[in-house]
Amino acid sequence: MAGDRIDPYRNYRFIVEIEGLEEAGFSEVSGFEATFDVIEYREGNEVITPRKLPGLVKYGNITLKWGATESMELYDWIQECIEGTVERKTITITAVDEEGEETASWNVIEAWPVKYTAPTFNGLGNEVAIELLEFAHEGLTRTA
């Protein structure tokens, strides 16, 4: 129909769920990407342009930012990794539409923390103290 309009999702309405963790209040999620290595191949009797074949798929690290609170759940996960117990989890990021309904959803598979950044403090500032956590993972799928 001519009157049906599909608007894109807003990037400021989302929910982050980390398997088994109740942490909330994320202000930013970034790093969603998958890239293919390109393998160039040329046989001796072919023209000067090589063939291009798909190679390995590589996934960029996912970064979560959130306002620091008294919750220690994510930090405890980081500490367990530091101590040698790397527990992999699924992270689900879900877009929320204007009516508050969950829409598009992405699963980050087999994720574990690889970088933690504590808040920067400034006696002259008035911003929220932000913690950053970066995750390596083994796959990204869109589920809705």
Image: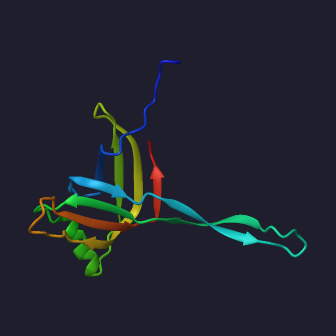
Q: Is residue 37 left or right of residue 121?
A: right
List the single residue furthest toward the front. Answer: 124
State the colouring used for the structure image.
rainbow
Spot occupied by residue 120 in the image (x, y as percentages of width and height)? 18, 70
Q: Quarter of the image containing the C terminus?
A: top left
Indicate the position of residue 53 as horizontal and vertical percent values. 71, 65
Most extreme residue toward the bottom is 83
Up-down: is 10 above or below 4?
A: below
Query: Which quadrant would residue 84 be assigned to in this image?
Result: bottom left
**Outermost residue, right side:** 45
Question: From the viewer's perspective, is 56 left or right of 124?
Answer: right
Identified at 80% across, 67% down, the residue is 49
Q: Residue at x 24, y 69 (%)?
A: 77
Give left or right: position of 119 versus 53. left
Does residue 6 lie above or below 137 as drawn?
Answer: above
Q: Nearer the viewer, residue 132 or 21?
A: 132
* Residue at point 47%, 52% (across, down): 141
Residue 83, percent across and down?
25, 81
Residue at image location 43% in from the left, 37% down from the top: 8
- Between 59 and 8, which is closer to the camera in this rendering? 8
How many labels sit on residues? 0
